[in-house]
Image (cartoon, helix red, strand yellow):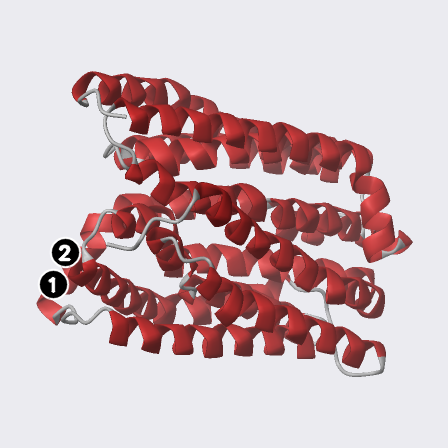
Amino acid sequence: MTPVSPLWRRLLLFFLIPGIAAISPLLVLPVISRTAGQAGWASAIAGESIGTVASIAIGFGWASIGPALVSMADRERRGELYRESLVVRLLVALIALPVMWVICWIVASPGSELFGALMGLQGALIALSFAWFSAGIGRPASIVFYDSLPRLVIAALCAFAIAHGAPIELYPLAGISVTLVGTALFTRSVLNQFPSPWPRWPELPGLFRSIAPVALNDVGLSVYSSVPTPFVTMTAPPAQAAGFASADKMLKLGQFIPMTLANALQAWIVEARGIGRGRRMRLAMLAHGGIGCIGGAFLATFGAWASRILFGADASSMTPVLIALGFTFAFFSVRTSMTRHVLYPAGQAAAVVRATLIATAAGVPIMVALALWIGPVGAAVGYAVTEGAATLLLWRRCLESLRILDNTQPIVD
């Protein structure tokens, strides 16, 4: 098993990742938002949102359940898990990427089709990332070395080049290159370090079935989180669409924090035995709740000012939109810990899927109706309602899982 490192060091390394992840796009996106114009900027973020849905589909649940599986596996099984994930994700990508490209092209404003589609492709290929595996074995340094730092350097170079006349398509093309090269290098290292057999073709249907509930849940979540920006882009005036795109981008950048915290705490929770594991799960949920409240308040209070500074006055966000998205962020943070730290390890994937599908089925029509009625603010309110429903529907099941864990575990701390 991987040697255990102190929690403070693990947290420090893992939080270096979202710090770099936030800085990287902020080096270049302000340049793009001013260069592409309102319609081009809205098309870019709409394409990115569609690419996120494709990314979740291609990832097929591995980003959510993979860290827990890897953290509890022995060395050979870890190698098998990575190989299985690689085969499954590549097969799904063969179907998902062409569909995503066509949808991005259709949604984009005239003249921005290629840029929007490339932004979608850049987002979709993130599904091939190895971050979930690094989280499971507690080695965040590999994410920094193979992905975060190269992405930071490339973003800075792209910002300079685009500001001096290079086409804006350079940014997504560079991001695609970083993902493919970094993942290829990391994969070669993992295959050598964790030798194990590749899955055989007859085993593939079983692999898809075993993780399908988690994949379905992730797709449901990504659908309702990716509907608002493309829909606003198609229905609202360019200025409002650009402002909503900026707000959505700040929300998505902020969501790196709870996702990274969940990854950092995953192995720490599994290391505990007995009732100590339940205690750590509760502490993790408390930490996520605090992060959610602080981040949501920051987005609501300072988001309009930040969007104006970052993306320019023509793409600045409205405070009512940001208040709604602040609630969205808080619910997202809590739900991330509930599912990854408590419900998935407790074998409650089916319950998570049911809650997500119910929230999506009810929330997306609300989102669309409110957007048509009161514009971007309505889309943001519908987004918050959907995220809140997905979280609250799981609350009782989460508490039950914790009580069951406490009652069945030996008293070992």
Quadrant into which the N terminus falls = bottom left
- Element under label 2? helix
Q: Does residue 152 appear to the left or right of 99 in the view shown?
A: right
For residue 203, the mark is 1
The residue drawn where x is 73% and y is 69% is 110
Can residue 141 be seen from the camera position used here? yes
Which percent across, then down, holds residue 309? 86, 52
Q: Does residue 237 appear to the left or right of 245 in the view shown?
A: right
Q: Nearer the viewer, residue 251 or 58?
A: 251
Which percent across, then down, holds residue 358? 40, 30
The residue drawn where x is 47% and y is 68% is 125
Q: Nearer the viewer, residue 255 or 94?
A: 255
Can residue 117 be seen from the camera position used here? no
Position of residue 348 relative to residue 89, above or below, is above
- Element under label 1? helix
Mark 1 crowd level (few <14, some 14–19, many ≥20, 10 Å Cα): few
